[in-house]
Image (cartoon, rainbow, N blue to C red):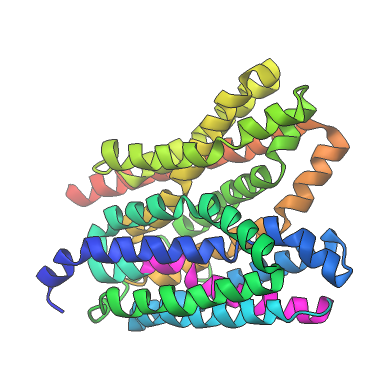
Amino acid sequence: MMAADLTRRRGVVTTTLGITQTLAWGSTYYLPAVFADPVCEALGLSRGWFFGIFSGALLLSGLVGPTAGRLIDTYGGRDVLAASNLVFAAGLGMLAWASGPVTLALAWAVIGIGMGFGLYEAAFATVTGLYGREARNAITGITLFAGFASTVGWPASAFMIDALGWRSACLAWAVLHLLVALPLNRFLVAKAPPPEHAAAPADAAPGGVPWTMVILAAVFAATTFVSTAMATHLPRIIEALGTTPAAAIFAASLVGPAQVAARVAEFALLRKASPLVTAQLAAGLHPVGAALLAFLGPVVAIPFVLLHGAGNGLLTIARGTLPLQLFGPAGYGLRTGLLAAPARLLQAGAPLLFALVLDGSGPHVALLLSGTLTMLSLVALLALASWNHEGIHKASM
């Protein structure tokens, strides 16, 4: 396909991937919040068992992510994403027939493989393979759609469970993958041109891994740990500081709108700025809000949630656009898969580890931990910006 044709179809591809990513996230990552109780009751399992198995699925998704990225670099993302819909459908079908911890774990293992091949990193690599360095707007557009995955997925799951039961609800999600997401990914996402060859990194550390990759992986891991911990415990933190459960839940519910609002603002105001600016804002907003909440208490719960949500929304964009700026489009899929792997590993343990801190030391120490991690990430990103600027200056001399 000629470059002009790819450009004309960019809106179609972005919309298509936004829709299919919304379905993918809503039927996998956001599934446990609604399905955990009915599944555990039916199978006679504790919630600890269920979420432990789910954590294993997240670990598996991180392990297979680099392989998915390499396949997308080589063959393009269209067929990989379409195949992920088959894997999702198979896993959800297995989940519908789960009868105990072993079959439940097998079902989530299949879903975990699908998550490694079919969530944001794969979608970002797909549009990068199509548009190269011009993929930034497409990445932001995808996140604008999929930012509503929980908003759509949680009520849809609850409605289907009430109307059909949880087993049939799993099958309904599987059917949506087969009848909606699969044909959309396969027939509306353009075929990628032949891949570029990745250049050898100039800042390789011992073992051949660029220092920039190491630092960026650490930043993404730390910020993903915080976002996952907050997604799990945010209402509890606010309540523990002295507010009512209803007020805590209301404040926490503003995370989603804040995420989407920040992504809209990034598209409108920052799309011509360096992705490092977006990443620095993403890392810097949470510690400001955490400090306010720790010192002023629940009176500033809503501002804290808005700051945290905005940073979380920008973080998703930065995870796609920053590697593109720093390393270029060649080998993008493999790089993003490698960068995401440590984040997925920490993400799997974040709910339990943060719960231990919150229960053992209280909300102020929990906020100190989350604020410190994100502040260190901001320092690392400022250092990357300085090194990047120096490299550009030397290259121009």
- Foreground: 238 or 181? 181
Residue 264 in view, yes or no: yes
The quarter of the picture where residue 133 lies is bottom left
Up the image or down, 375 lies above or below 179; here it is above
Q: Percent from the top left, x then y, of residue 219?
A: 54, 49
Residue 34 magenta-highlighted: no
The quarter of the picture where residue 108 lies is bottom right
The residue under the point 51% across, 62% down is 339
Q: Percent from the top left, x then y, of residue 38?
A: 78, 63
The residue under the point 67% across, 63% down is 161
Left or right for 397, reference 23: left
The quarter of the picture where residue 197 lies is bottom left
Left or right for 322, reference 247: left
Which residues make up the magenta segment? Answer: 101-125
- Foreground: 350 or 186? 186
Counting every numbered tag in the picture gives 0
Up the image or down, 91 lies above or below 216; here it is below
Q: Main secondary structure of the magenta part?
A: helix
Q: Percent from the top left, x then y, of residue 289?
A: 58, 27
Residue 209 in view, yes or no: no
The residue under the point 43% across, 69% down is 122
Q: Residue furthest front?
A: 163
- Foreground: 27 or 346? 27
The residue under the point 33% across, 79% down is 76
Up the image or down, 291 lies above or below 187; here it is above
Left or right for 273, reference 171: left
Q: Percent from the top left, x then y, of residue 114?
A: 55, 76
Q: Quadrant of the N terminus?
A: bottom left
Up the image or down, 344 lies above or below 170; here it is above
Residue 124 magenta-highlighted: yes
